[in-house]
Image (cartoon, rainbow, N blue to C red):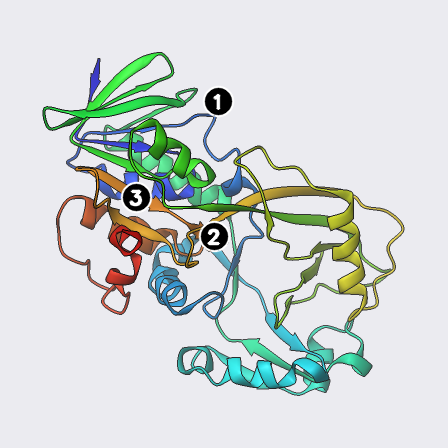
Amino acid sequence: MREADVIVVGAGMAGASLAAELAPGTRVIVLEAEDAPGRHTTGRSAALFSEIYGNAVIRALTRASREGLSPFMTPRDCLHIATPEQLERLEAFAGLPDVAASSRQVTPDEALSLCPMLKGEVLAGALAELNAYDIDVDALHQSYLRRIRASGGEVVCDARVEAGERADGLWRVTAGGEEFRAPVLVNAAGAWGDVVAGACGVAPLGLEPKRRTIAIVPAPASCPDSPFVVDVDEDFYFKAEAGRVLVSPADETPSAPCDAAPEELDIAIAIDRVQGVADLPVARVLASWAGLRTFAPDRTPVLGFASDAEGFFWCVGQGGYGIQTAPAMGRLGAALAQGRGVPEGLAEVDVAALGAGRFS
């Protein structure tokens, strides 16, 4: 029997960030199903910080995370582009108040100067971000894990949750052949969030894991590094760096929770879509991978206690935004799990929109 104040299920970015914020003064045990943290979605991110990516709640969480991410970020130009058929949607997007505050519209010629790979004949407009960055995901993740351990918390690997029940004011969880007890159980299991809930007798939320594919191809000869380029409809994105080009079809293929693998068709679609707007001959694929982005039914993360299970706390549904929102989600989640108020710097986040009770 191992006892704690809080058990966190999942040592990926979501669980690690929340546990790191809880750990000072709180006995925390983090249970990780795999042999090491970050085997799945956390280790397969495109690693972009974008304040204008996602819905309004996501954008607020991202802005609130900038300071916490700053030691792990380096500047990266980012362009959101549109063809003539997409120009109206780009202008509507650019007109959103918080998007306008973090970006500026640029002419096609300006966009071409930033990214010479683009085809001028298909480019009608672009939006340049003012606060976009690359994130060192591994360094960020490891910093959270170190903070957990430095505060006396434990990260237990090879501990897949087999069963859980609430009795006498405690959650009793069986994982990896051991039993763990705590008054609060945090479900930060990503794509396996509903699976963990089911094992604990808690109603599922209807989480939707979706596969996202990324491939690396050679850059054209003498191709300069490029901004991170995103189609305004999010049908693809790419960036050139160090003689290679990262491409993605921005796919969201429904999937069961699993160790996701790329499909050849999705890689071909990614290349074809990027070639529609950029001069990118591709003779071979250097590498490819896939990860699962898990969404709640309304595509807004879930952060809060379950309405049907005492002491069961949800931290799931981050979609493709879990890295760039980790500091804010971790701080806010720790505060809510301990019954404290909203932390300083998070006042603009719509906490009610994150609550698990909205699905009751």
From mark 2 to mark 3, how far is it between C-alphas? 14 Å
Q: Give the crowd class for mark 1: few <14, some 14-19, many >=20 residues within 10 Å.
A: few
Question: What's the residue type where badge 3 is placed?
Answer: Trp
Instruction: Indicate which label's residue lies in the foreground, 1 or 2.
Output: 2
Mark 1 residue element: loop
Extreme-left residue of the structure: 168
From mark 1 to mark 3, how far is it between C-alphas? 23 Å
Of the numbered discs 2 and 3, the one sitting upstream in the chain is 3
- For residue 147, which numbered disc appears in the image? none
- In the picture provided, is 248 more to the left or to the right than 120? left
Of the numbered discs 1 and 3, the one sitting upstream in the chain is 1
Q: Residue 203 occupies which quadrant of the picture?
A: top left
Q: Residue at x 15, y 26 (%)?
A: 170
Mark 2 residue element: strand
Q: Horizontal and vertical percent for residue 187? A: 32, 37
Q: Which residue is mark 3?
A: 314
Of the numbered discs 1 and 2, the one sitting upstream in the chain is 1
Q: Nearer the viewer, residue 196 or 287?
A: 196
Q: Give the crowd class for mark 2: few <14, some 14-19, many >=20 residues within 10 Å.
A: many
Q: Residue 309 occupies which quadrant of the picture?
A: top left
Mark 3 residue element: strand
Q: Which residue is mark 2?
A: 319
Q: Residue at x 35, y 31 (%)?
A: 198
Q: Which residue is mark 1?
A: 35
Could you tell me if the residues under marks 1 and 2 are in contact, i.e. CB atoms within 8 Å? no
Could you tell me if the residues under marks 1 and 3 are in contact, i.e. CB atoms within 8 Å? no
Q: Nearer the viewer, residue 336 or 242?
A: 336
Q: From what the image shows, is residue 76 above or below residue 93?
A: above
Q: Horizontal and vertical percent for residue 30? A: 32, 29
Instruction: Indicate which label's residue lies in the foreground, 1 or 3.
Output: 3
